[in-house]
Image (tube, rainbow, N blue to C red):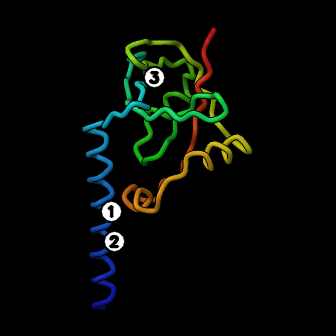
Amino acid sequence: MRAIKIGGIVLVSYVLVVAAFESLLGYFQPESPDTLVLTTVDADDSAVDRVLQGLHTDGQLYVAVNHWPRAWYRRALANPRVQVTRDGETRDYMAVPVTGDEHERVESDHPHGLAFLILTGFPPRHFVRLDEAD
């Protein structure tokens, strides 16, 4: 019985650490030279901005779903016409879900370390290719 109680405490503590880490990332939205602002549109046609890291593989621009909060990803799948702001310039893009060999290639070019995976609770990773709209 004692082992079950300790296991439960460890599990709840881990879930709280992951929730705190994800919440702080969402709140502070840290930026680096590779960050961009992705603007998606929700069901009410309201624009929603999200700071993400731009990933480059084979001359293509990608963004990754690296965390459990993924509302921007669901919005981009529902309405793939998005805007990307980088270096003060906003352009129109089409968000294309990445699968198969392309997913494996982008994943291998941009791996995550074990510490990051532990802190984020091992979320499944998805990629979106951003193709410039005509």
Sequence-first disc among 2 and 3: 2
Q: Amino acid at mark 1?
A: Val
Q: CA distance from mark 3 to mark 1?
A: 29 Å
For image coordinates 42% across by 12% down, the residue present is 89
For the view shown, which residue lies furthest in the bottom direction?
1
Establish if 6 lies above or below 24: below
Which secondary structure, mark 1? helix
Establish if 36 lies above or below 29: above
Label ID, residue 51 = none
Which residue is identified by label 2?
Answer: 11
Front one among 96 and 63 = 63
Left or right, residue 102 beside residue 130: right
Which residue is identified by label 3?
Answer: 40
The answer to whether mark 1 and mark 2 are in CB contact below 8 A is: yes
Establish if 78 lies above or below 1: above
Label ID, residue 15 = 1
Measuring from the top left, give residue 98's x and y in whole percent. Answer: 65, 37
Q: Quadrant of residue 6?
A: bottom left
Front one among 9 and 60 = 60
Left or right, residue 121 beside residue 96: left
